[in-house]
Image: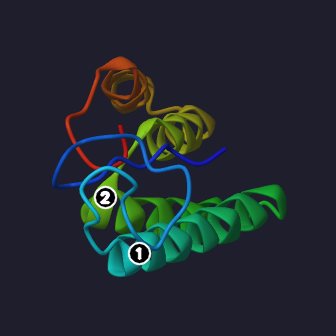
Amino acid sequence: MSEPLHCPVCRIRVEQGPQCRRCRADLTLLLALADQRQQALIGAYRQAAQGQWDQALATAHGIEAIHGGRDVCRLLALGCLLRRDFARAWRWYTAGAQPRPSCYD
């Protein structure tokens, strides 16, 4: 499940693109970035499903560095749980529960 997008100019939820329906801002690059993020997240889940947790966590950390979200925090929390790193898992879990001001709110 991908995080919903919001226009970086007027903050309205983006339902389709490439232009904001309210302010007419060009959302082409934002939509491309969101698509690349989603593809990377799918890859991380695929790696996790194959038991490649080190690679899945590395991919998830890369996604988080560019733009995190609840979906990434959940994956990072799960990976930390499987590594028995409970303190870090809790931090990722609680980070995923916090609202984040961004284009992906």
The image position of residue 30, as x and y in percent, is 35, 71
Q: Quadrant of residue 93?
A: top left
Secondary structure category for the residue under label 1: helix
Q: Are discs 2 and 1 less than 8 Å apart at CB?
A: yes
Label 2 or label 1, whichever comes before in sequence order = 1
Extreme-left residue of the structure:
9
Secondary structure category for the residue under label 2: helix
State which quarter of the image contains the N terminus.
top right
Residue at 54 percent of width and 50 percent of height? 15
Disc 2 to disc 1, C-alpha distance: 10 Å
Is 18 situated above or below 70? below
Left or right: 72, with 69 as reference point: right
Residue type indicated by callout 2: His
> Tag count in the figure?
2
State which quarter of the image contains the C terminus.
top left
Disc 1: which residue: 33
The image position of residue 89, as x and y in percent, is 43, 29
Disc 2: which residue: 67
Q: Pick the residue in front: 49 or 43.
A: 43
Residue type indicated by callout 1: Leu
Q: Quadrant of residue 92?
A: top left
Q: Residues within 10 Å of mark 2 (few under 14, many from 20)?
A: some
Is 91 situated above or below 50? above
Q: Pick the residue in front: 103 or 83.
A: 103
The image position of residue 19, as x and y in percent, is 39, 69
Is 79 situated above or below 24? above
Residue at 31 percent of width and 58 percent of height? 67
